[in-house]
């Protein structure tokens, strides 16, 4: 039995709640979704809404009636409080209102997109090269980050109801959700007043910075010189075995701190690692890392992810039927694994009236 078997969810999907509803569905909840606007991106629509029961958005009364019968309501407010569900939700339900900004903040009531949320959160401020414009992550990461928090709030509400027997209500800010995902910048500013800057391909520690992304023979890997003597010795040992080392072979890694080493010296050492990585494939470097404890990771491109035998073995991807076109596509599926997996999901291209769904639930 899945974790949320028997839990019913009504989701008003506006971008902010979509991924949260997907997470609850993957945990076994029955999710009925009302799309507050026509899907703008087919790929996201398939990935985030497959397996949900789609309801028509033109039957306000039926949607409000359903809100009084479900266990969880994820009420997206990005496009406005269209259905006015606050007084319709059951007192025993978990009611999560998700808006772009907090109701008490200076931006209360303003519209937002994934781009504006990403910019306001500070995530763009620290993404990109120092002398270049800020960059946005691919996809709709601010929406996804908010959806994760929406699902988390809903699960916390279920736990509280289990302990107290009472329904729960919570307001969630998309801006705060994205801001608090900002690695350390928000916390650093709160405690020190320091504003972080874009560092590009540089991890700054102490008075020096080290590279993080390296080109190799057939792509890229991620690895950094850090104050971990055994790791550094392991990398240098393989370089020596391959006859591809120089000054770094003579360094006593137990006697130095990389973070306290002059940047000019760091650059000279990194030039040796750069030449070594460039001569070998991702697969070879990744294998050495696993065998010898380098802490290096291979960077996969989208095609690599789709072809990954490891991800296939873990059952990440599922086949989804797009009934509008009749085509089957592979999309990310189970985010979690439980004792019993549900049958493969499918997308419902033709939404059903909310009134019919309510009637069917009553039978």
Image: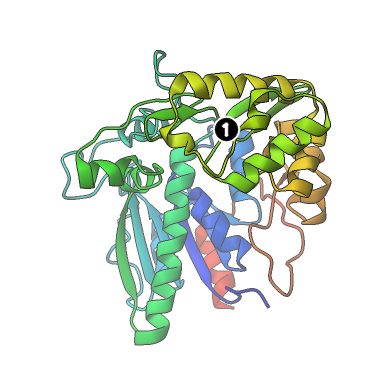
- Residue at the location (53% across, 39% down)? 226
Q: Residue 270: horizontal and vertical position, in percent?
A: 59, 23
Count of labels in the image: 1
Q: Does 87 appear above or below 329?
A: below
Residue 200 or 26: which is nearer the viewer?
A: 200
Is 43 left, or right, of 309 in this rendering? Answer: left
Q: Residue 36: horizontal and vertical position, in percent?
A: 44, 44
Mark 1: few/some/many CA within 10 Å (<14, 14-19, 20+): few
Q: Residue 191: horizontal and vertical position, in percent?
A: 22, 47
Q: Secondary structure at mark 1?
A: loop
Residue 255 or 301: which is nearer the viewer?
A: 255
Q: Quadrant of the C terminus?
A: bottom right
Tell me the quarter of the picture where residue 170 sits: bottom left
Is 70 left, or right, of 109 in this rendering? Answer: right
Q: Does 274 appear above or below 76?
A: above
- Residue at the location (80% across, 26% down)? 280
Is 25 left, or right, of 202 in this rendering? Answer: right
Q: Residue 212: horizontal and vertical position, in percent?
A: 56, 31
Residue 62, visible in the rendered structure: no
Tell me the quarter of the picture where residue 213 sits: top right
Residue position marked by numbered label 1 in the rendering: 41
Residue 268, visible in the rendered structure: yes
Q: Does 146 appear above or below 202?
A: below
Identify the colour scheme used.
rainbow
Residue extending furthest toward the top: 131
- Residue at the location (68% across, 78% down)? 1
């Amino acid at each position: 039995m899945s974790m949320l078997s028997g839990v019913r969810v009504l989701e008003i999907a506006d971008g902010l709640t979509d991924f949260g509803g997907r997470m609850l569905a993957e945990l076994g909840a029955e999710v009925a979704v009302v799309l507050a606007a026509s899907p703008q991106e087919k790929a996201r629509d398939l990935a985030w809404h497959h397996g949900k029961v789609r309801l028509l958005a033109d039957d306000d009364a039926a949607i409000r009636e359903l809100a009084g019968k479900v266990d969880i309501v994820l009420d997206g407010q990005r496009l406005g409080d269209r259905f006015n569900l606050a007084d319709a939700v059951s007192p025993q339900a978990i009611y999560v209102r998700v808006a772009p900004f907090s109701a008490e903040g200076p931006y209360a009531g303003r519209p937002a997109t994934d781009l504006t949320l990403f910019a306001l959160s500070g995530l763009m401020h620290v993404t990109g090269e120092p002398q270049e414009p800020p960059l946005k992550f691919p996809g709709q990461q601010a929406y996804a980050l908010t959806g994760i928090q929406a699902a988390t709030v809903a699960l916390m509400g279920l736990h509280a109801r289990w302990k107290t027997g009472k329904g729960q209500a919570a307001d969630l800010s998309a801006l705060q959700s994205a801001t608090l995902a900002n690695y350390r910048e928000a916390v650093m500013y709160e405690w020190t007043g320091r504003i972080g800057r874009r560092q590009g391909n540089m991890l700054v520690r102490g008075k020096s910075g080290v590279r993080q992304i390296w080109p190799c023979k057939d792509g890229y890997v991620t690895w950094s010189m850090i104050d971990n003597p055994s790791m550094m010795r392991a990398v240098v040992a393989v370089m020596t075995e391959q006859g591809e080392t120089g000054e770094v072979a003579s360094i006593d890694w137990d006697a130095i701190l990389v973070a306290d080493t002059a940047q000019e010296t760091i650059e000279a050492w990194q030039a040796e690692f750069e030449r070594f990585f460039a001569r070998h494939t991702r697969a070879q470097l990744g294998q050495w890392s696993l065998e010898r404890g380098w802490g290096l990771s291979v960077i996969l491109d989208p095609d690599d992810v789709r072809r990954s035998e490891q991800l296939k073995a873990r059952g990440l991807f599922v086949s989804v039927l797009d009934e509008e076109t009749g085509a089957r596509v592979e999309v990310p599926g189970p985010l979690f694994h439980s004792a019993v997996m549900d049958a493969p999901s499918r997308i419902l291209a033709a939404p059903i009236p909310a009134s019919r769904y309510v009637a069917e639930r009553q039978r």
